[in-house]
Amino acid sequence: MSIKRLLLLSSILIIIGFLFLMLQRNWLIIHVAYFPFSPSAATSSKNTAVSYQKQIGIDYYKNNAWVHEECTAMWHENDLAQTLKQIIKQWLNVLQDAHLLRPHVAVATVAVASTNSEAYISFDNTLFSKEMSIRRKWLIIESLCKTIRGNELTLQSLTLLHHDRIMDDDHLDFSHPLSLESRL
């Protein structure tokens, strides 16, 4: 093989390698109707999601009676986990404003099983203070379940987590999923 051919082959391979590097780092974008390795092909189904504001109902127990409050939240038509997260954020805000929950509790992550029947809700802080009675804790849990049922989500059970681990409480056992069926 002559030196000219070797230099030509080496330079072609260097150019091809540099093109692949530019494609990988998104320095070079090739727009083709269907290019299976592009990031837009993998996310094209997510772009069709519809989000809008919707009136939701929040239920909670205060002064020996159930209270129903209406508020707005973002509703994600094709993303049940995001919709549930928005509902729980509103639920937390309402209960904290009513001084029923300890302050500085926020929902960290929400995951929904592929069957859309079970949800895993992780909070950044525990929902209950050590001084709360068992009855008050159960009413808060029932408030969450009633709020989710009232907004007609397709869920059947919840697992409550604290920092992505099973929530720990001295009085209640959260190691099993909570059914969304009415308990009261």
Image (cartoon, rainbow, N blue to C red):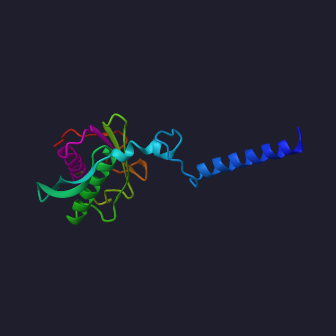
Q: Which of 14 and 168 is in front in this view?
A: 14
Q: Nearer the viewer, residue 35 or 106?
A: 35
Q: Looking at the rendering, which quadrant does residue 12 occupy?
A: top right
The picture places residue 82, in percent across and down from the top left corner, at: 33, 49
- Left or right, 89 with reference to 20: left
The picture places residue 133, in percent across and down from the top left corner, at: 25, 55
The picture places residue 179, in percent across and down from the top left corner, at: 26, 38
Q: In this view, does 1 lie above or below 56?
A: above
The picture places residue 42, in percent across and down from the top left corner, at: 46, 42
- Chain part drawn in magenta: 136-160
Rendered residue at 64%/47% (across/down): 20
Q: Which residue lies furthest to the left in this view?
A: 65
The answer to whether residue 133 shows anywhere in this view is no
Rendered residue at 27%/39% (across/down): 155
Q: Which of 137 and 178 is in front in this view?
A: 178
Q: Is residue 123 magenta?
A: no
Q: Looking at the rendering, which quadrant does residue 27 occupy?
A: bottom right
Is most of the magenta stretch helix, strand or loop?
helix
The answer to whether residue 124 shows anywhere in this view is yes
**Count of marks, rendered view:** 0
Rendered residue at 43%/45% (across/down): 43
Q: Does the magenta stretch include residue 144?
A: yes
